[in-house]
Image (cartoon, rainbow, N blue to C red):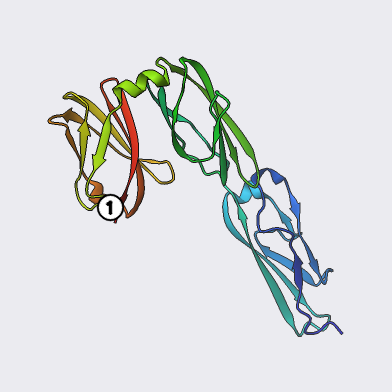
Amino acid sequence: LLEGIRPDIEWPSDTICLNAGLVQCQAQPAGPNGSWGGAADLNGLIDPMALGAGTHTLYYSYTDFNGCSTRSDTVHFLIPETLQADITAQVSGDTVLLSTNSNAETLLWELGDGTTAVEPLLQHLYTAPGVYTICLNAFSPCDTLVTCQEVEILASGLDALHRQTVVTLYPNPAMGDLPLTLSGVHPGAYLLDVFSGQGHLVLRQEGECRQGKIYLNAVEDLPAGHYFYHLVLDDTSVSGKFELY
């Protein structure tokens, strides 16, 4: 009577969390003629911790009572990696450059002065000196992670307006070495960081700034896309963005 019936795995979600515990699979038709395979044991149990993060496949086969026909159903599901989020804070006077290396789906920064942001990489200007607690809230389908870090701001935003450095990039978009032309600065040692559009540090360069120009080397090794830079020169820091093609 059941010959030719296609079995159906009753699967509520494409994602199972690592901390979900044992998951009992269900399928129709059920009974002794059904068998599980792939990510589940013979009883249809899935152990996410034993499987680990990644994409997994679940099989269910059903043989009719005559033993003449066997059909199966297949489901693919994802076990996400453990949620991670860190804070990298670079402080220069009244300004902090924040970045994170996170696998979260969404982020929320709380910057300690009543303001918030959602970008993985951002520059924030504080209007008063003091110690601020910066918290990063990371969210995934399976978890929420909060990471906090204190930063000390020594100068006010009004003071910074009188020592602002102007940076010009040309050409932008660019290929090959990218020159940064600076005005309003004296020769001195610099530290230049480049971040991807996702907030990951992809290039760090140190050297001496002479005649108001810095050449950003090795950008030809980076894939095309949008990037952010953060330049520290003496007691001055500036940030901006550029595009490679």
**Position in image of residue 204 (x %, y %):** 28, 36
Furthest residue in direction right, as rendered = 1
Residue at 41% x, 46% y is 197
**In the image, residue 33 above or below residue 148:** below
Quadrant for the C terminus in the image: bottom left
Residue at 57% x, 47% y is 105
Residue at 21% x, 33% y is 182
**Position in image of residue 65 (x %, y %):** 84, 80
**Position in image of residue 48 (x %, y %):** 66, 49
**Position in image of residue 137 (x %, y %):** 59, 35
Q: Secondary structure at mark 1?
A: loop
Residue at 35% x, 23% y is 161
190 vs 218, nearest the viewer: 190
Q: In the rendered view, does 186 fall on the left or right side of 72?
A: left
Question: Disc count in the image?
Answer: 1
**In the image, residue 83 above or below residue 211:** below
Furthest residue in direction left, as rendered = 211
152 vs 27, nearest the viewer: 152
Q: In the rendered view, does 227 fall on the left or right side of 119?
A: left
